[in-house]
Image: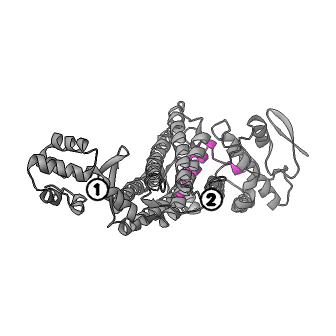
Amino acid sequence: MRKERDYLGELEIEDDAYYGIHTRRALMNFPPTGERLDETFIWAYFMVKKACALLNTELGYLDERIGNAIVKACDEWETLKEHVLVDPLSGGAGTSINMNINEVIANRATEILGGKKGEYLVDPIDHVNLHQSTNDTFPTSAKIATIVKLRKLIEAVINLQEKIQEKEKEFYSIRKPGRTQLMDGPPIMLGQEFGAFADALARDRWRLHKVEERIRSVNIGGTAIGTGVGAPKDYILKIVEKVREVTKVKIAKAENLIDATQNWDVFAEVHGLLKSLAVNLYKISNDIRLLGSGPNTAIGELILPAVQAGSSIMPGKVNPVVPEYVMQLCHMVFGHDTILNHTCALGNLELNQFAPLIVHLTLKSLTLLTNACRSLTEYVVNIKANEKRCEEHLSRSVSNLTPLIKMFGYEAVSEAVKRANWDIGKTLEILSREKNVPIDEIAKKLDLKKMTGLGYSL
């Protein structure tokens, strides 16, 4: 064990630990929840620290040996990430997470310079955190990580949309009854239903693409509250460019660093669009479940892929486990959105104290939705149509009689359907007899092929 000291006192730290006393206090104060910091966020934070070290060295604020050691340590982030142990739900607006990363980098940089952990030839605050604050490095790292993960999600949405569009073409000639409120409705093409799924995803794709513009604006250089206190002007003016160069992510300096430090509404905006995607994924998944339900005793118009056995007691049972998985992930996102609305609003004055929760749930929702899209994409590819069932259902649907309303009136057709006990053939016989119109002439008005076209009328 080694001893480390801060202004609160002294604590013992394991000799082989890369973290230091601030991290130790955080681990004591914030018991683990089982959650882990997002790996992309950890990468982004190390890269922000690298950019700061590079610029401070170039400007002469850091000794070159120390600056180079910090840069080398940051490049080892994949090895060092296991030592970032502070819980994502820690208090302090992210200070403990920032300090955990500062201490890990400082101890590794100290080793690079020939020292031992805890000697701090490279200091966590005076060197690694030079001209920075948690309040500008944390949100900047969060936005970079969000952009990276957002792009992966958009790619997953595009792939899902394309596979659903392929099904739209494959199923376009298959007629079936539509359903409103789960009851029989006018005819629709199975491909048209899938086309509607694809169009909903197209909107999500566009919305997510456009929102990146708002999240590119970062407050790095603003330090504690956006005024840049403690940082020299030449550093403030150049740091965004250096972070952009290191991360290869197109970010821009916020026009108002104070606004960008205290107001987190952009995360509420981004997550609101994630919620919109979750709404569509939920609806699509549930519709697929319904259309494949039974398959012998319910709708059964889709033949769903058998991806795993569905029961430990019922032989041969196959369940729609992938749509159910997607729907569960969507429920998580719905919950995250409610939390984010409150936490983004509850920031006080110059700082949002709930930054760790906001960031953690945003990145987690991005992961959940990316997983949902990828799983559903693989599932959709193997969905098949039960054409025979679709035709059987369509032939028995009294909603096919909808065009007769213009011919005989709503009340007359409704009364005939009721008297015929919802039998289509008997309904036509009643209307033919009572309205003195040949049954063949009435039947000609019920062209199911035309009914699925836009604006079909008698």
Image height of 311 relative to 347, above or below:
below
| Label 1 or label 2, whichever comes before in sequence order | 1
Q: State left or right for residue 400 relative to residue 182.
A: left
Label drawn at residue 309: 2
Q: Callout 2: few (<14), some (14-19), or many (20+) C-alpha neighbours within 10 Å?
A: few
Q: CA distance from mark 1 to mark 2?
A: 34 Å
Q: Amino acid at mark 1?
A: Pro
Q: State left or right for residue 331 relative to residue 115.
A: left
Taking the magenta stretch, the answer to whether it contains residue 395 is: no
Quarter of the rendering containing residue 415: top left
What segment carries the magenta color? 128-149
The residue closer to the viewer here, 88 or 327, is 327
Q: Is residue 234 visible?
A: no
Q: Amino acid at mark 2?
A: Ala
Q: Position of residue 26 (x, y in %)?
A: 75, 39
Q: Position of residue 183 (x, y in %)?
A: 35, 45
**Residue at 8%, 50% in the rendered image:** 436
Q: Position of residue 347 (x, y in %)?
A: 54, 33
Q: Position of residue 231 (x, y in %)?
A: 60, 45
What is the residue that sits farthest to the right in this orientation?
1
Quarter of the rendering containing residue 419: top left
Q: Main secondary structure of the magenta part?
A: helix
Q: Quadrant of the C terminus?
A: bottom left
Q: Callout 1: few (<14), some (14-19), or many (20+) C-alpha neighbours within 10 Å?
A: many
Give the colour scheme shown: one colour
Taking the magenta stretch, the answer to whether it contains residue 133 is: yes
Q: Secondary structure at mark 2?
A: loop
Residue that badge 1 annotates = 187
